[in-house]
C-alpha cells in the first residue's frame, strides 16, 4: 500500500481511500445493505470485505465476524464505522487499540450538525484523530462515503461500473448520489471518483482538490460546498491558494448563498457560511466556475466539459486551451420564425451574440436556396427543407469564421426509415464539418413523454452529439465552458510572463 503522505511535497495521497485493498464495515446490519451491494455490484473482492456483527453469522451471503479482533488482517485499509453516536468514540478507541486503520468513513450522523451533545462528540473525534492518531485520514461524520469504479468501491449499488473522467467532492451525500444517477441516465456520464465528505472533521475539500488535480484518472472536478468547518481556521486560505493553481476545470455549486440557506446548512453539516463578496472575489481570481443554485445546471455543465475532455484527453494543456471557444458568437438553425425570435431574446439576455451574415455569405446562401419561406438570417429559419439536397450545403455555408457555436433544433418526429436515416446522416455530416472547424455543435431536443423521442435522444448521445433539452440550459453550459477557456488563457499568459 502507498504511504498516506507523499514524500516529495507532503501532499496527502487518497489512493487507499478510493481503492482500498480491504474494507471493514462496523457494525454490519441488514439496513446497511446498500453498502454491501455497492461493493458487490462494482466487483470488489468479497473475501476482503469484512463484516463485523456481534449478532449475525452472515449477511447477504458474506461471513460476519463477531468482533474486530477476529478479522484476519492486521491492517484495515478502509473502515466504515456505522454505529449510533453515543458509542462512536468508545467503539473507535476499541477498534484502533486492536487494528491498524488507514482510512475511516464515519457514517454516523447526529453529531456537530445536530445538537450540543453531537458537537461534543465531534470535538472528541477531532481531538482523537489530530493528537493520538494523526496518520489516520477520515471523511465525515455524517456522510455517505466513497465511489470509485476502478477501486471497485461504491456506497450504492445503482452507480455505473464503468469509470470516467469526472471527480466529485460533495458535502451532501444525497446530492452526490443524484449527480451520479441523473448524470448517467440523462447524459451517459461516467465518473472517476466520488466522495461524500459530510462534516469534515478531518479531510477537507482542499485535500481532495489537491489529490484530484494530480489524479491521472480525473479531468473534471465538481464540488458541492456548504461552508467551512469550525475546526480548520486556515482552510479558507488553503482552499484559495489551491484553487489559484488549478488547471483542471472545477465546477463549483455552493449551498447557503442566502442567509436563510446558511441556516439550513448549519442543520445539515454544521458548516459555517462565508460572505458572498468574498466568493465573488475568489471566482474572479481563480479558474473556478460558479454554478447557479441548481443540480440540473451542474450536470449540464459537467456534460459539455466531459465531451470536450474525453475527445481531447491526449492533448497538452496548451493544445486544449487553443481549442476552447475564443468568442460567444452563435448561429441558430431551426424551422420556426417565432421560435427564432424567442431564441434570439434568450441568447442575447444571457450574453451570447448572434452576428448577422455578411453580404458574401448571404449571396452564397441565396444561390443554394432562393428563399421562398423562412429566413436566410441568423437565426437561420429553414422550414420544410431539412431533407432536401441543398440543406447540408446551406448549413455549411452559414457556419462562417465569425461563429463559435452552432445551435440546431433537431426534429425527432417519426419518419419512414429511409427519411430518418437520410436526416440523421445529415446531422452527422454537419457535426463532422463543425468539429473540423474547431467549433461546437449543440442540438436542442425538447423533452416530453414520448418513447421515440427518448430513443432518439439516447441515439444522439451514443453517437457523441452534445444535446440539451432546451436552449437556455445549452447556452448557460456553453458560457461556462467559454469562461473557463478565457480564465485558462489568462493563467497561461501569466505563467509565461513569470
Image (tube, rainbow, N blue to C red):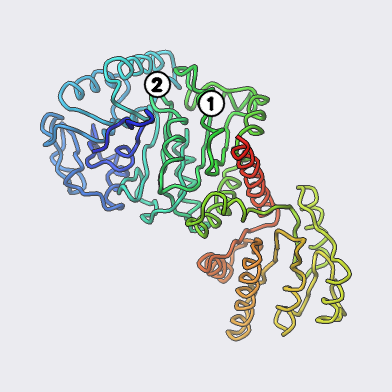
Q: For residue 111, which numbered disc appears in the image? A: 2
On the question of residue 47 being in view, the answer is: yes
Tell which circle, 2 or 1, labels the residue nearer the N-terminal end.
2
Q: Residues within 10 Å of mark 2 (few under 14, many from 20)?
A: many
Secondary structure of residue under mark 1: loop
On the question of residue 442 being in view, the answer is: no
Image coordinates for residue 108, horizontal then vertical, percent: 34, 28
In this view, the mark in front (2 or 1) = 1
Q: Residues within 10 Å of mark 1 (few under 14, many from 20)?
A: many
Q: Quadrant of the C terminus?
A: top right
Residue behind mark 1? 227
Report the side of 396 relative to 76 (left or right).
right
Judging depth in this view, the residue of 167 and 323 nearest the camera is 323
Judging depth in this view, the residue of 416 and 250 nearest the camera is 250
User: What's the residue at 58%, 33% (across, down)?
Assistant: 254
Image height of 487 relative to 106, above or below: below
Image coordinates for residue 220, horizontal then vertical, percent: 50, 46
User: What's the residue at 73%, 78% (across, down)?
Assistant: 393
Q: Quadrant of the N terminus?
A: top left
Image coordinates for residue 242, horizontal then vertical, percent: 51, 31
Amino acid at each position: 500500500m502507498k504511504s498516506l503522505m507523499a514524500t516529495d511535497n507532503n501532499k496527502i495521497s487518497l489512493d487507499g481511500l478510493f481503492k482500498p485493498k480491504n474494507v471493514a464495515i462496523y457494525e454490519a446490519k441488514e439496513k446497511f445493505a446498500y453498502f454491501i451491494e455497492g461493493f458487490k455490484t462494482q466487483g470488489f473482492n468479497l473475501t476482503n470485505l469484512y463484516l463485523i456483527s456481534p449478532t449475525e453469522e452472515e449477511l447477504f451471503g458474506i461471513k460476519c465476524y463477531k468482533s474486530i479482533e477476529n478479522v484476519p488482517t492486521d491492517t484495515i485499509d478502509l473502515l466504515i464505522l456505522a454505529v449510533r453516536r453515543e458509542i462512536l468514540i468508545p467503539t473507535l478507541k476499541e477498534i484502533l487499540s486492536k487494528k491498524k486503520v488507514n482510512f475511516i468513513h464515519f457514517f454516523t450522523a447526529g453529531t456537530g450538525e445536530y445538537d450540543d451533545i453531537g458537537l461534543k462528540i465531534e470535538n472528541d473525534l477531532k481531538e482523537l484523530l489530530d493528537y493520538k492518531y494523526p496518520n489516520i485520514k477520515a471523511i465525515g461524520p455524517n456522510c455517505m462515503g466513497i465511489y470509485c469504479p476502478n477501486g471497485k468501491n461504491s456506497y450504492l449499488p445503482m452507480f455505473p461500473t464503468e469509470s470516467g473522467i469526472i471527480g466529485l467532492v460533495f458535502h451532501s451525500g444525497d446530492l452526490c448520489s443524484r449527480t451520479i444517477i441523473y448524470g448517467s441516465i440523462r447524459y451517459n456520464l461516467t465518473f472517476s471518483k466520488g466522495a461524500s465528505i459530510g462534516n469534515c472533521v478531518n479531510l477537507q475539500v482542499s485535500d481532495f482538490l489537491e489529490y484530484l488535480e494530480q489524479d491521472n484518472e480525473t479531468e473534471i472536478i465538481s464540488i458541492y460546498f456548504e461552508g467551512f468547518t469550525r475546526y480548520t481556521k486556515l482552510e479558507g486560505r488553503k482552499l484559495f491558494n489551491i484553487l489559484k493553481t488549478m488547471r483542471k476545470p472545477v465546477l463549483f455549486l455552493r449551498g447557503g448563498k442566502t442567509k436563510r440557506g446558511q441556516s439550513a446548512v448549519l442543520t445539515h453539516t454544521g458548516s459555517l457560511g462565508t460572505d458572498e463578496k468574498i466568493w465573488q472575489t475568489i471566482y474572479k481570481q481563480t479558474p473556478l466556475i460558479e454554478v447557479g443554485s441548481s443540480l440540473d445546471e451542474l450536470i449540464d455543465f459537467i456534460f459539455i466539459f466531459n465531451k470536450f475532455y474525453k475527445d481531447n484527453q491526449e492533448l497538452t494543456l496548451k493544445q486544449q486551451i487553443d481549442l476552447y471557444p475564443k468568442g460567444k458568437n452563435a448561429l441558430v438553425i431551426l424551422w420556426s420564425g417565432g421560435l427564432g425570435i424567442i431564441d434570439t431574446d434568450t441568447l442575447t439576455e444571457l450574453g451570447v451574440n448572434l452576428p448577422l451574415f455578411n453580404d458574401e455569405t448571404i449571396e452564397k446562401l441565396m444561390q443554394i436556396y432562393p428563399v421562398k419561406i423562412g429566413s436566410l438570417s441568423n437565426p437561420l429559419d429553414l422550414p420544410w427543407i431539412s431533407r432536401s439536397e441543398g440543406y447540408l450545403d446551406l448549413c455549411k455555408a452559414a457556419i462562417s469564421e465569425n461563429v463559435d457555436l452552432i445551435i440546431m433544433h433537431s426534429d425527432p418526429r417519426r419518419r419512414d426509415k429511409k427519411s430518418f436515416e437520410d436526416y440523421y446522416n445529415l446531422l452527422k455530416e454537419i457535426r463532422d464539418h463543425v468539429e473540423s472547424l474547431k467549433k461546437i455543435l449543440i442540438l436542442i431536443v425538447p423533452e416530453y413523454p414520448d418513447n421515440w423521442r427518448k430513443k432518439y435522444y439516447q441515439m444522439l448521445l451514443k453517437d457523441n452529439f452534445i444535446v440539451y433539452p432546451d436552449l437556455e440550459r445549452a447556452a448557460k453550459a456553453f458560457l461556462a465552458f467559454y469562461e473557463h477557456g478565457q480564465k485558462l488563457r489568462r493563467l497561461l499568459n501569466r505563467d509565461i510572463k513569470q
